[in-house]
Image (cartoon, coloured by chain):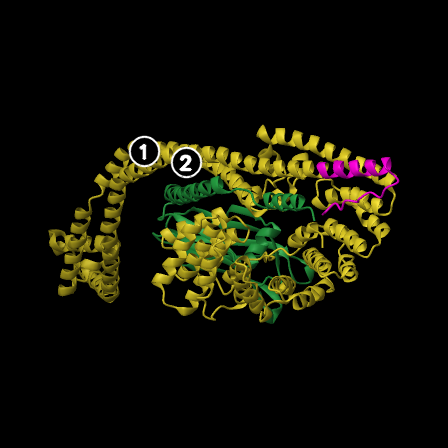
Chain colours: A yellow, B green
Amino acid sequence: MTPRWRHFLAMALTASVLMQAPAWAQELAAGEVRDLHFGEALFHFYQDDHFTSLSRLLMAQEAGRITHHRDDAELLAGGLYLQFGMYDEAERAFRKLLDERSDPALHDRVWFQLGRAHYRQGKHEAALGALQRVDGRLAGYAAAELPLLKAQSNMALGRYTSAAALLENWQGPADWLPFMRYNLGVALIRSGDADAGIAQLEALGRTPARDEEDKALRDRANLALGYTWLQQSEPGRALEALQRVRLEGASANRALLGVGWARTAMDDHAGALVPWQTLWTRDRLDGAVQESLLAVPYALARLDADQQAVHAYERALAAFDDELRHLDDVMNAAKSGELVDALLLADDPERARWHWQLDELPVSSVSRYLHALIASHGFQQGLGHYRDLLALGRHLDEWHERLETFDHMVEAQMLAAQQRAPVIDARIEAIDVESLVARRDELAARLEDIARDRDVVGLGNDEELEFWKLLEELASGPALAAAPEQARERHRLLRGHLLWQMDRDYGYRLWQQQRALTELDGHLEEVAPRLQRVMEIRAARPQELEALAERIDALSPRIDVLRDQVALLRAEQAGVLTAMAMSWLEAQQQRLVAYQVQARFALATLYDRAATAARPAPVLEPGS
Amino acid sequence: MDMKRLLMAVLLAASLGAVPLAAEQSLDTRMQDLRQEILHLNRELFMLEEDLLFPANTQVAVFLSMDVGEFFALDSVELKLNDRVVKRYLYTPREVEALLRGGVQQLYLGNLRSGSHELVAVFTGKGPHDRDYRRATSLNFEKGIGAQFVELKISDRVSRQQPEFLVREWD
């Protein structure tokens, strides 16, 4: 086996593939939401607006608006901290739940989240420690993800036998099966059980794929399988596996290269030329394509087509020169600080704000050279930080403006309150509750007298009283006494009728008056506290406005300080990303230079062979 | 085997795979601290905003939630308070998805004086058999001293194969 195979085999047998969907998100959706404000945090969370989700959640918690979902809220907060890379804060939120709650099922969920947090940080021992505390009470997606996480942690620690054991007993959703099977195949091969591992990869490599993700995974399985068969000196089987890899896709170039090596191992050098020459038309930055630039003349030389081999080496040298020139340009652009902005051009303005993963790489000369770096976790994380800092900066700018508006509002309200104060005071002053109460008491006493004496006249209506007064005045005056008998009789009848009428209505009128008095008492009872509240509001308003103004005054400089810090950190982050890119580009430069040396050496050998045609010339393997 | 070239290949592979992250890690810690500070600040700013613009004694918030959504695909909502339109909202597929997964949208936040009020919500979308569907629901409520929360809930009534539009007050 050539050393170069080992390099590509190592790349093909990547330690593990990660599941995309976090189980905790599905878990939170289960059951009815019984706190509106918790539901609101979920609403933003499900739209990937994690910052708003966390901000609203923290505010609702602070305001005591989450009562039914306290534990879920802590779990969500912890998960959101994780999304933000705030591992310490996430751990604090989870530890709090462990300390304060005794529910074993909740503990399982928390240990699971803590395990995920450690795993995301690359703390695999700690991750395993936490995940092993989970005691069988997880349900649904989390239960299925637990053994996968344990297995991935074990694989990261090089414990492939343990990982394989975990994966062999795995049970979970059918659409996760390809991920599991790939990881199991890799774990088994790495643990030394190549046959079992190959069986897993074979099964996956022949499974019909439903979507692009499955197809990519199937390609990876076939690629790993092909290189494993090459390692086992089984080029025929390697060929079979590698030919199942699609001609387009992330694994295609390495598969084509492997096909060439398999055919070489079968002494079919002409056959090897076909896939290798296909690679020539592809992106020259790809490691497999660069390798093919040396592999093609190697095969030609093995076919004794020296002249063509010389041309092919010269073509390879020209290609390397060309790429080195481009690389120089890109390095100069990266050094001048254009790199990060160029990468962010492809961001979706709607989602860029808190969107972390770069789903599709932007097409530019810079990104072309940095494709693999950009796709790497470290660079993605750094880019995520930078994008996040941009968004945080914009967010602070918005608050800065709003705070200015708030400041003006409070000022205007203070002025309005000052202007309205005398009017309000005068109106409060004019309200004399005591005199109202005195008037009520007077009426109540009068009603009591009427009831005690059964004073039917006392409850007469205005018309009756006027008539009664007239009759009484007539009775007390000299005129009636002097009047004829008929007139006096008429007066007596009228008085009697009026008295009868008032007596007839007395009971109803007394009940009416007593009911009115009760109603009045009710209203009077409300007046005092309402007035009290108005006076309190009146007294408190200036202080409230003052307090709001103080809060604004305190927040304003904090925003300014944080804006400066964001700007500073953003510049530093751009520097880090540029340094990562430069280091990456320099490595590519070194690799191209090394290939140049190899090509020149091989070319010199061919020239030498041509010059001394009589004696057989050595042929240099490109990967030896 | 040419050991020098093997070594070179291994070194190259190593240098391609590993990028030094030492400087980034300390930056990472500072990022964590900064995010934490901004989150705290944000919480305080939201609270200030609410205290200033929507004080508890006049605050009214209307929320919208959905359950299964089999019989109704939400397009928009119009909200009226005391016969005045206070909100018209057109939903994106992403928002509808978030609602179906259990999210609750704060549709409206405003102020009302204490006393009796009428809320009317008109929902527009696609009903059973993909037909255009428009339904209204209303609530008469008494606004007290504290903040008032109202939930509009779109639910599937399986027995009638129809959507159901509910409105309820929260304590």
Identity of the amino acid at label 2?
Leu
Chain to which the residue tagged by mark 2 belongs: A
For disc 2, the neighbor class at 10 Å (few under 14, some 14 to 19, many from 20) is some
- Where residue A451 appears, as percent x and y from the top left, is 16, 64
For disc 1, the neighbor class at 10 Å (few under 14, some 14 to 19, many from 20) is some
The N terminus of chain A lies in quadrant: bottom right
Could you say which is closer to the camera, residue A404 or residue A520?
A404
Question: Which label sits on residue B78?
Answer: none
Q: Quadrant of residue A206?
A: bottom right
Q: How many marks?
A: 2
Secondary structure at numbered mark 1:
helix
Question: Which label sits on residue A562?
Answer: 2
Secondary structure at numbered mark 2:
helix
Could you say which is closer to the camera, residue A599 or residue A401?
A599
Q: Is residue B3 left or right of residue A516?
A: right
Q: Residue at x 84, y 39 (%)?
A: A609
The mark that comes first in sequence, 1 or 2, is 1
Is B8 situated above or below A159? above
Could you say which is closer to the camera, residue A74 or residue A475?
A74
Q: Nearer the viewer, mark 1 or mark 2?
A: 2
Question: Which label sits on residue A414?
Answer: 1
Q: Is residue A89 in view from this perspective?
A: yes
Q: Is residue B165 in view from this perspective?
A: no
- Where residue A365 appears, as percent x and y from the top left, is 68, 35
- Where residue A384 appears, as percent x and y from the top left, is 54, 43
B75 within the magenta span: no
How much space separates mark 1 and mark 2, taking CA atoms? 29 Å
Chain to which the residue tagged by mark 1 belongs: A
Q: Which residues are magenta?
A: A597-624
Do tag 1 and tag 2 residues touch (Cβ < 8 Å)?
A: no
Q: Is residue B54 left or right of residue A18?
A: left
